[in-house]
Image (cartoon, rainbow, N blue to C red):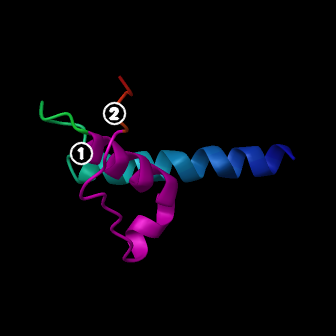
Amino acid sequence: MRILSILLVLWFIIGALAGLQRHYYSGSDASCAKAGTIAVTILAGPLNYVGANPKISACTVPQPSS
C-alpha cells in the first residue's frame, strides 16, 4: 500500500511538472477552461510525455435558478 501511495504522488508530481513546462500556471486569464486543462494535465501525469496533450476548450457553469 505504501508503494502505491508513493507511485500516485510521483504520478501527480510528473503531471504538475508537465503543466509547468507548458506554462499553464502563468498569466492572469483565469477561466474554467484553463483550470480544467491544468487539472487533466496533472491527472494525465507521465502520459503527457508520451503524446497526451489534454485540453479543455470550453466549460459551462450551471446558472442559479431564480
> What is the chief secondary structure element of the magenta stretch?
helix
Does the magenta run of residues contain 59? yes
Image: 49 above or below 20 = below
What is the three-letter code of the residue carrying label 1? Answer: Tyr
What is the three-letter code of the residue carrying label 2? Answer: Gln
Residue 5: quarter of image: top right
Q: Observer-nearest residue: 30 or 7?
A: 30
Is the residue marked by circle 2 packed among few (<14), some (14-19), or many (20+) residues within 10 Å? Answer: few
Q: Observer-nearest residue: 40 or 50?
A: 40
Residue 27: image location, x then y, percent:
12, 35
Which residue position is annotated with label 1? 24
State the residue at coordinates (22%, 38%): 31
State the residue at coordinates (71%, 45%): 6
Q: Earlier in the sequence, mark 2 or mark 1?
A: 1
Q: Are marks 2 and 1 in contact (CB under 8 Å)?
A: no
**In the orientation shown, which residue stands out farthest toward the front?**
66
Residue 16: image location, x then y, percent:
41, 45
**In the orientation shown, which residue stands out farthest toward the right?**
1
Which residue position is annotated with label 2? 63
Residue 15: image location, x then y, percent:
44, 52
**In the orientation shown, which residue stands out farthest toward the bottom?**
51
